[in-house]
Amino acid sequence: MADLETRIAQARGDAPADLVLRGGAVFCVVTGEKIPGDVAICGDTIVGIGADYDGAQVVDVTGLTLVPGFIDTHLHVESSLVTPFEFDRCVTPRGVTTAICDPHEIANVIGAPGIRWFQHAAERTVMDLRVQLSSCVPSTDMETAGAELTADDIAALMGHPSGIGLAEFMNYPGVIHRDPAAMDKLRLFEGGHVDGHCPQLSGRDLNAYAAAGIRTEHEATTAEEAREKLQKGMRVLIREGSVSKDLHALQPLLTEATSPYMCLCTDDRNPLDIAEHGHLDYMIRELIALGTSPLAAYRAASLSAAQAFGLRDRGMIAPGYRADIVAVDSLEGCHAQAVWCAGRLADAAAFAARGDLPPIGRNSVAAPRITARTFRHAGNHEDTPVIGILEGKIITEHLTEQIPITDGDKRPDPARDLARIAVIERHGKNGNVGTGFVRGFGMTRGAIASTVCHDHHNIACVGADYDDMALAARRLTEIEGGFCVAAGGEILAELALPVAGLMSLEDFETVETSLEVLRAAAKSLGVVLQEPFLQLAFLALPVIPALKLTDRGMVDVTRFEII
């Protein structure tokens, strides 16, 4: 940051600004007005708007609208399937200048070193990558993760400049029932920021959760749920990920009156969706197309987000604010033509200047021996719980179906859209295998498997054929984790994710192409889901209602117990 006197001198025009953006109009996210005139930047700070300035460097932005940099208020970089540096290169040019991440995916595989790796990455990214400290590793005691983080482990990670607070507190029963381990973690951040995660929580239980000092929440899937959370003092983060798509449901609630208390987030979004649709830029376009005012949409994407997370130095294009600026074609179009992060143009040279970040978490897949018999599902009565997929949501239905028993096994039934699902412990801890049934894939043959399996990241596999399931699952060990599609005894498509079984070492363009091939291969099996791999991953997350599967068995999430 330039010294105080220099900033003031450049603001008054007593000295030329370091950088001047000339010819555009600034969109004010307080009044909704467009302000003509230059934008003067001194170092990493905006020092002037609405006037004429001289500058050591002048950039012509004639015809463009300048808006504050977008802030993604909750995401897991790992779900982009690329490293933090590649995520930076993928979304920063789209206008995302701040991303608040929770690295609990890698932490569930390799523990605290994974979080430290993200902190090191944050020191060098072009965007401002903020690293929250993961609160629930593992998310519950109903799964086997690769690591565990206690309150002492979290305390040892505190104090890094990238930190804001404690990441999403998924163990909401632990909060409302005052579990001692949960209380120890919350006490570390009393008076600070704690992210929420409490799907469908309401009434006194929601009161209790909010009373713990939890102030943000991204799991609302209906306007009614979001309204109650707003009324109880929580900032609601509208989420639009690759699987969890809540924007259309919550859009009617986002108005100029509520926008100071609502933000935008992606949670989990992969490079294929980003390439085909966009990131926060897509959310802004879609909100405005649905009738949200540009003021409400851009405010939620910037100033409201900054204030919700205590980032008082950003969120507006105004003197004294961090120079995070996006030049867009129009407010409705929201196509970034140029992006500045802390006054630095986000171009190829800026990304190249970061250097390299050595990978971590290699050879993390240590699954037991897997054969076709691994996937048999024993039972002594035909009443069978079935996970019912709701496409576009990570909540599921708890269905019950009559499934006949043949030779001690309940077999998949493609005619009824009943596929076998299995979760295989892959951290070398116990070799557990949980099996069950799922409806919604539409699969008629073959299998798909993944080590992206929230949040414990064991192997998740779904299929109509046991031999293909075994082939796909075994292949994941050979490629150090990733995605795999198999049918007829052959591997049809795969994507290796050797960084903790979660992230590729390739660039995001290569990953995007691989995802296209994987999606086509899945469709060849009859799969009807738009995003089958991440949909599969969330079927193993036992903190999202109503029925899920872990390596320990089927979990009734509404009762928070293994059934």
Image (spheres, rainbow, N blue to C red):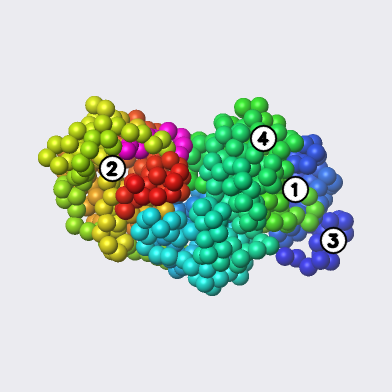
**Residue closest to the eye, 67 or 222:** 222
Q: Residue at x 75, y 41 (%)?
A: 29
Quarter occupied by residue 56:
bottom right
**Is residue 182 placed above or below 250 in the rendered structure?**
below
Q: Which mark is residue 8?
A: 3
Residue range of the region highlighted in magenta in the rendering: 385-395
Q: Position of residue 69 (x, y in %)?
A: 66, 48
Q: How many marks?
A: 4
Q: Earlier in the sequence, mark 4 or mark 1?
A: 4
Relative to 413, 497 lies left or right: right
Mark 3 or 1, closer to the camera? 1
Question: How far separated are the C-alphas under marks 3 and 1?
Answer: 16 Å
At label 4, the amino acid type is Leu
Q: Which mark is residue 317?
A: 1
Question: How far separated are the C-alphas under marks 2 and 1?
Answer: 53 Å
Mark 3 or 4, closer to the camera? 4
